[in-house]
Amino acid sequence: MNELSLRSLFTSRVALIAGLLVVSGVVLYVLVSKPFLVLIGLGAFGPGIFRELGWLRDQDEFQVQTTRRAGYHAYLTGGLVTVLVLSLMEVRGPLTGDASEWILLVLVVLWMTWLFSSVMAFWGAPRTAARVLSTFGLFWAVFVFTDLISSADIGGDPMGFVLRIAAGCAAVAPFFVPAFTAARWPRATGAGLLVVALALAVLLASGGNLPLATQLLTMTLLLVPFAGSGIALLKTDHPHPGRG
Amino acid sequence: MSPRHEVRNDVRRHRRQLPELTQQALADRVGVTRQTIVSIERGQYNPSVGLALRIASALGVSVEVLFQVDEGQVDE
């Protein structure tokens, strides 16, 4: 096994372990106890810290440059959001409710900016948009169809069931249709994604009486894939070239 | 006013002159990922001197043939 294949294997193992830590951290944080957040931190930041200390050498120069640039983007966005949150506190008075949600909002902004910037530089806008939207769409589809099937009365009302399945398809279409068209018509898809992001923002802003931090957190998680992909696709000069 | 140095490269053209040399094969030879070669060929990433020399060596040409600098454009 040569040096490169060893490095590829090592990179995929590091990514796998980091991914497992993040996923298990999310699951345990949601289902068991909030201190399991530390697992997410280890998975998200551990490999990068090891690389900067020189203990982990699993990336080539383009990957290192991409990651560091993404880090700068995360610094800028995270810094701006932190200042905005602090300013908001000054205007609205001391925080009421769960302060950890505000900290979580800043963390999510930091991490999503870093992740989005990394994959965007690595894959290019059309592929990133297609993959991010497909991933989010898949999670959303599992959620929607699990709910549909578990509450369905197929024997009693088959027509109603078909209509609900159609409604489910309509709910996941905003993810999969642009994922399919991103490479072919990047600018039109980008514009469409920004419209969807705007519609979602209006919908989420008017929905319910959730605390402000929770609303902003939900908006960040749902809107970043649409808005980020949309802006990146609008900046695309030409359709994705073929591979050699 | 400052000169803008655009780096052009002919990596794709020279690679395609060697039929067996896919992006992955070139990446393996020079010790990077395929995505790095893709980004260099698209002009989205300018490699370090060391990597440029390794690519030139793998393609059997000199680095000056592979990479050129345009100094014509000037920022106002």
Image (spheres, helix red, strand yellow):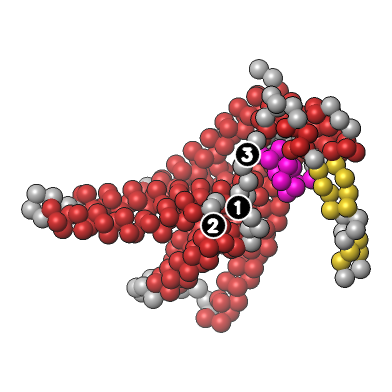
Q: Work out how far the residue at label 2 is from the one at label 1, CA to CA, in angstroms.
A: 7 Å
Label of residue A239 in the image: 1
3D distance between C-alphas at marks 3 and 2: 18 Å
In this view of the protein, which residue sits in the foreground, A208 or B15?
A: B15
Chain at tag 2: A
Q: Is residue B22 above or below residue A199?
A: above
- Amino acid at circle 3: Arg
Mark 1 secondary-structure assignment: loop
Q: Which mark is residue B8?
A: none
Position in image of residue A175 (x %, y %) = 43, 55
Tag 2: amino acid? Trp
Say which quadrant the N terminus of chain A sits in.
top right
Mark 3 or 2, nearer chain start: 2
- Whether discs 2 and 1 lie on one chain: the answer is yes
Could you confirm whether marks 3 and 2 are on the same chain? yes
For label 2, the SS is loop
Q: What residue does disc 2 label?
A: A185
| Badge 1 amino acid | Pro
Q: Residues within 10 Å of mark 1 (few under 14, many from 20)?
A: some
